Image: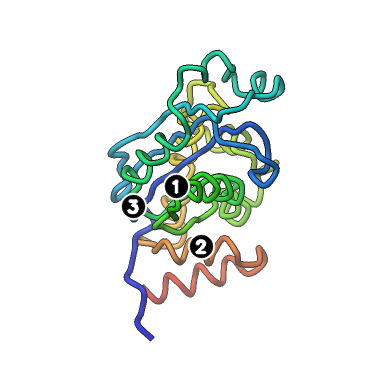
């Protein structure tokens, strides 16, 4: 069996969606996407767009995100925005906070275009649960405060959340380097770590460091 090529964890697309609700299976659609491109630990590009879902946004979502139906009236349709995002993302692997949510919406929106994402997903929230076990909880806002990640106070807007998630991802990679001498973690290792039982995280990290 051919070994998968090494892909570094510091070269990824970090993305976030704002949506009309919780489930594309219930007819919910994306209303905004924000994404940050990282290459070798440096942010090299950003992508952001509102998108018109073709349906009204509930009042709760307007209040939660600040994205109004009026704002979406002149936004490009979801299909147009997602075509552009596919070009932006290329074959990069993807990171999101609570990735199962963003993954469902990405797949649902791309399915309408008869496309699929080229890259795989990793979840920064699952990783944070293993690396920051002393945090009060592992919501993005809590971790931003816990780690003193610089921010302008904007939450629940796609690009702002993607930016903060990118900083969190880099903080986790820096922690692996400083505490465990893991200087070049692979994306597949980060996926494995995020699924590892919390009690055996230290052993897995030591084993990976010894194998480098």
From the viewer's perspective, is the residue at label 1 or at label 2 nearer? 1
Residue 5 position (above or below residue 93): below
Residue matched to label 3:
11
Q: Residue at x 44, y 51 (%)?
A: 94
Residue matched to label 2:
191
Q: Residue at x 63, y 52 (%)?
A: 129
Estimate the x, y position of residue 24 in percent, counting from the top left. Answer: 63, 44
Residue 120 position (above or below residue 208): above
Estimate the x, y position of residue 188 in percent, counting from the top left. Answer: 44, 66
Q: CA distance from mark 3 to mark 1?
A: 26 Å
Q: Residue at x 66, y 40 (%)?
A: 27
From the viewer's perspective, is the residue at label 3 or at label 1 nearer? 1
Residue 84, by quadrant, is top left
Quadrant housing the C terminus: bottom left
Q: Residues within 10 Å of mark 2 (few under 14, many from 20)?
A: some
Q: Residue furthest top?
A: 70
Label 2: element kind: helix
Q: CA distance from mark 1 to mark 2?
A: 27 Å
Nearest to the observer: residue 4 or residue 24: 24
Q: Residues within 10 Å of mark 1 (few under 14, many from 20)?
A: few
Label 3: element kind: loop
Estimate the x, y position of residue 159 in percent, counting from the top left. Answer: 45, 30
Q: Residue furthest bottom?
A: 1
Q: Residue at x 50, y 46 (%)?
A: 112
Quadrant housing the N terminus: bottom left
Residue 29, by quadrant, is top right
Residue matched to label 1:
113
């Amino acid at each position: 069996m051919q070994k998968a090529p090494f892909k570094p964890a510091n070269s990824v697309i970090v993305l976030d969606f704002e949506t009309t609700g919780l489930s594309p299976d219930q007819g919910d659609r994306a209303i905004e996407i924000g994404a940050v491109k990282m290459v070798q630990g440096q942010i090299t590009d950003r992508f952001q767009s509102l998108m018109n879902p073709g349906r009204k946004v509930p009042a709760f979502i307007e209040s939660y995100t600040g994205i109004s139906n009026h704002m979406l009236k002149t936004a490009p349709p979801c299909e147009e925005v997602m075509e552009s995002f596919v070009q932006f993302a290329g074959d990069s692997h993807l990171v999101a906070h609570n990735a199962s949510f963003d993954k469902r919406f990405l797949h649902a929106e791309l399915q309408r275009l008869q496309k699929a994402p080229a890259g795989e997903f990793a979840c920064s929230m699952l990783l944070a649960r293993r690396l920051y076990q002393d945090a009060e909880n592992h919501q993005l806002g809590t971790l931003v405060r816990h780690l003193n990640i610089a921010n302008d106070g904007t939450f629940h807007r796609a690009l702002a959340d993607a930016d903060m998630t990118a900083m969190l991802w880099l903080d986790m990679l820096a922690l692996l380097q400083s505490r465990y001498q893991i200087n070049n973690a692979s994306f597949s290792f980060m996926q494995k770590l995020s699924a590892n039982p919390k009690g055996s995280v230290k052993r897995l990290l030591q084993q990976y460091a010894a194998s480098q």
